[in-house]
Structure formats: structure tokens, C-alpha cells
Image (cartoon, rainbow, N blue to C red):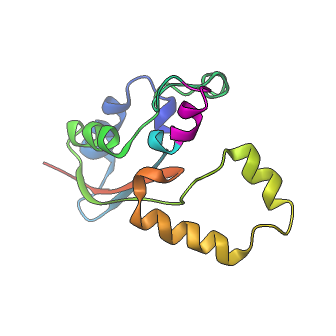
Amino acid sequence: MYLEHLDDRILVLKRINDEWLSDNAGLFLVCPNAPSRQIAVKMGLLSHNTAISRAEAKHGHRITYALDTLERDVKAAGLKVIHRSGIFFKALANFQWDRLLATDVISKEYLEGCYQLGQQYPDLCSSIFLLCEKGR
């Protein structure tokens, strides 16, 4: 399921918490990250970090989350956040990454460095995640 594609995300998260998640299970949520789009905003491609681009709308996106808004919705649904972080430091657009990864310009060490940097700066990551457990 893609949380950013749902109209009523809190309702779905609440059902996960209340009906589907056992007391000793965890829920791992991963979403695209709004602040990773700061370069696109500075370039004038997006009006603001959480704007839905035409391509995203075409793919069914309803929201672009940041850590604070994702955590807000998770808590509103009654889930308990255990851990939060980013996944991969993102300095380029996806199409740029696709082109670079088809060459020998990007090494495995560079990719690992971007992953580690993402742990330090989650607001600059391409994706964010929350590890949750059943709440109230």
C-alpha cells in the first residue's frame, strides 16, 4: 500500500492499529520525503516542498510527507512511533540518478556514503521512515 496515494490515510492507519497489528508486531512505514525537494523549489520547478508535481498526481499521489506530517498522521491514528529516520541522502532528481547509475560515475562507496549521510540528515533524504508499534 502507498500511504501517499490514499484519500483517508488516518482511517487506514487507525484500522491497522486497531484491527490488524498484533501487540508484538511492528509497522514499517516508508514515504517519499517533501524536504528532499528543496532544490526543485529553488529551481522554480515546484512552488513548495510538499507540492504535488504533475507526474506524482498522474501516479495517484495525494500528499507529500515530511517527517513531522507523517508522524502527525501516525499519532492521530493511535500508533506509537519507535524510531524515525531518512533512508538515502538525495542531491539529484530521480531522472538524474537513473542516468548516472547507468554509467560508472557513481561507485558503491558513494551510494553507501549517501545512505550513511541520510541517517545523519533525514530531512535531506529521498524517503523517510517510521517504525511503529500498536498504540493505545
Question: How many discs appear?
Answer: 0
Residue 59 pos. (x, y %):
65, 28
Per the rendered image, the range of residues in magenta is: 37-46
In this rendered view, identify the residue nearer to me: 116 or 91.
91
Looking at the image, residue 5 lies above or below residue 72: above
Looking at the image, residue 63 lies above or below residue 2: above
Quarter of the rendering containing residue 86:
bottom left
In this picture, residue 66 sits left or right of residue 96: left
In this rendered view, identify the residue nearer to me: 136 or 80.
80
In this picture, residue 92 sits left or right of residue 52: right
Residue 12 pos. (x, y %):
36, 34
In this rendered view, identify the residue nearer to me: 39 or 79.
39
Residue 17 pos. (x, y %):
27, 45
In this rendered view, identify the residue nearer to me: 80 or 33.
33
Residue sitting at x 60%, y 52%: 91
**Magenta stretch: helix, strand or loop mostly:** helix
Q: Residue furthest front?
A: 42
Residue 133 pos. (x, y %):
26, 57
Residue sitting at x 61%, y 28%: 56
In this picture, residue 131 sits left or right of residue 87: left
Residue sitting at x 38%, y 59%: 85
Would residue 29 be seen by someone viewing this image from the given angle? no
